Image (spheres, helix red, strand yellow):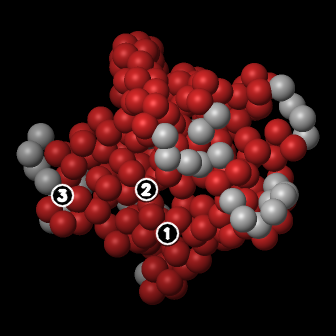
Amino acid sequence: MIAVFVVASVVLLLVAALVLAPFAFTDPDVLDGPLPTLPLLALLIVPLSVAALTAIAGTALVGTGPRAGRMRRELSLRWDPKAVKKGVALGFGGLLLALPAAALWTAWTGDERTSSAVGEEFTDRLLSPGTALVAFAALWLLAPLAEEVLFRGVLWRALEHWRWNRWLIFTATTALFAVAHLELLRTPLLLLLSTPIGLARVFTGNLLACVVAHQVNNFLPATALLLTTTGVW
């Protein structure tokens, strides 16, 4: 399973490069400034989606145990209303911690260095309502689902196969998730944001709770993106 995670991570990087290649070939200067809207949306949606699908396919191929129920067993993804409720609770609890922490972080480091890479790319950009809704849905729903499949699904299960203690797995996946965003100055804040999402996996043993907690966490920035890019706010 660790090989599945590594391959999916490499696929993510390769697909990101392939997504940008046609635009860079058409206009070599496209990478020197803010990306145009179309390649930006493609970069937001396609690499993570393909990486998550790669992880799912890899799990189906090399996961342990009988094929019947393998995906549900290996990714620990199953429908459970209680897990959804815990995911929502931990997501909101994380927001209660993250909002004042983000305010303090902003006051300490400055606005320009605390916004996410996605937020920076969409700054001062006006989009059509349809395009803005696509970006909103990608940030709110798609990105959390894909990232959780990779980190709290495949990677978590791989470390379980290595018989790591669940708290050690929680620590490792939380740290790697924060570092993988490649936003060095925001890494401490990302660690804080990632903590309740990892706790959802610890307390429920269900990837669905992590996805829900992550989506709750992403709802506010996704809404802010929608409002700013449509000129409402």
Is 82 placed left or right of 53 in the picture? left
Total labels drawn:
3
Residue that mark 2 sits on = 142
Mark 3: which amino acid? Leu
Q: Position of residue 213 (x, y in %)?
A: 45, 34
Q: In front: 34, or 47?
A: 47
Residue 15 in view, yes or no: yes
Q: Are marks 1 and 2 in contact (CB under 8 Å)?
A: no
Q: Which mark is residue 126?
A: 3
Mark 1: which amino acid? Val
Residue at 60% x, 67% y is: 53
Residue 198 in view, yes or no: no
Is 29 placed left or right of 61 in the picture? left
Residue that mark 1 sits on = 46
Residue at 23% x, 59% y is: 133
Q: Position of residue 3 (x, y in %)?
A: 84, 59
